[in-house]
């Protein structure tokens, strides 16, 4: 059962973090567009894999469950470094409460973000996120890259809403990334046409 917090609440919960974190998923795309077009079933929060234990310590009062592939939830033990195959951690305030947000571990080399599905795609943290009202959000072209793999109807809708708002540089970056990851993707023509 989910009852996600929103980005403003995430800022309160994670405000003491001294490591990078950012809002991802549909909320990031809607923040970029400056409007909402759909309901959200969860809140995705990204962070670097190397900062996971600091996040765990920050959320010491929360129940945190790791999602072992292919999605089996289990308690995330204190001090446990999750291996590269585990990307998602679900968070809630107590064992009987609803899930409030999902932490998504991102690969990196120092401050260089590495796309987990294809390590040829990398970005500096400065270009990975953008800021609105004191909250970092994942760049829309990067979020759309994540949504491009086996897009669901909501992912297609997100693309339709956001692609026209991308700058030339953002469109070019996403089209190039899609050429590397899935050369025949239908979004490439829409980005470059």
Image (cartoon, rainbow, N blue to C red):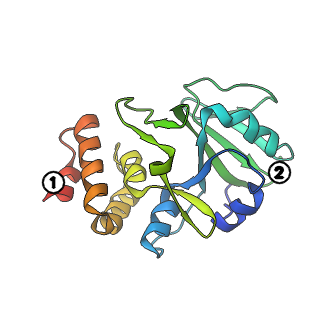
Q: Earlier in the sequence, mark 1 or mark 2?
A: 2
Q: Mark 1: few, some, or many residues within 10 Å (few <14, many ≥20)?
A: few
As drawn, 47 above or below 152: above
Which residue is at a point 80% across and 45% down the rendered structure image? 58
Residue where numbered disc 1 is placed: 189
Report x, y in % for residue 103: 63, 45
Farthest right residue in view? 61
Farthest left residue in view? 193
Report x, y in % for residue 112: 49, 36
Which residue is at a point 46% across and 75% down the rendered structure image? 34
Q: Tell me the number on the disc at residue 96.
A: 2
- Label 1: which secondary element: helix
Q: Quadrant of the C terminus?
A: bottom left
Report x, y in % for residue 41: 57, 60
- Label 2: which secondary element: loop
As drawn, 75 above or below 9: above
Nearer to the camera, 99 or 8: 8
Report x, y in % for residue 53: 74, 33
Q: Nearer the viewer, mark 1 or mark 2?
A: 1
Which residue is at a point 56% across and 29% down the rendered structure image? 69
Quadrant for residue 83, please give it.
Answer: top right
Quadrant for residue 136, please give it.
Answer: bottom right
As drawn, 25 above or below 133: above
Is 61 on the left-hand or right-hand side of 147?
Answer: right
Is 136 on the left-hand or right-hand side of 162?
Answer: right
As drawn, 14 above or below 29: above
């Amino acid at each position: 059962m989910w009852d996600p917090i929103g980005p403003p609440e995430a800022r309160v919960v994670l405000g003491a973090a001294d490591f990078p974190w950012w809002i991802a998923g549909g909320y990031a795309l809607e923040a970029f567009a400056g409007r909402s077009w759909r309901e959200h079933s969860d809140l995705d929060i990204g962070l670097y894999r190397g900062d996971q234990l600091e996040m765990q310590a920050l959320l010491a009062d929360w129940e945190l469950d790791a999602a072992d592939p292919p999605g089996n939830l289990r308690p995330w033990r204190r001090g446990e470094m999750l291996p590269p195959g585990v990307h998602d951690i679900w968070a809630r305030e107590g064992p009987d409460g609803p899930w409030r947000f999902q932490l998504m571990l991102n690969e990196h080399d120092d401050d260089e973000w590495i796309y987990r599905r294809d390590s040829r795609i990398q970005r500096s943290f400065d270009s990975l996120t953008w800021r609105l009202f004191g909250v970092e959000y994942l760049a829309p072209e990067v979020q759309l890259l994540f949504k491009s793999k086996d897009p669901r109807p909501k992912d297609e809708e997100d693309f339709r809403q956001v692609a026209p708002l991308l700058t030339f540089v953002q469109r070019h970056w996403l089209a190039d990334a899609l050429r590397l990851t899935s050369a025949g993707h239908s979004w490439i023509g829409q980005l470059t046409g």
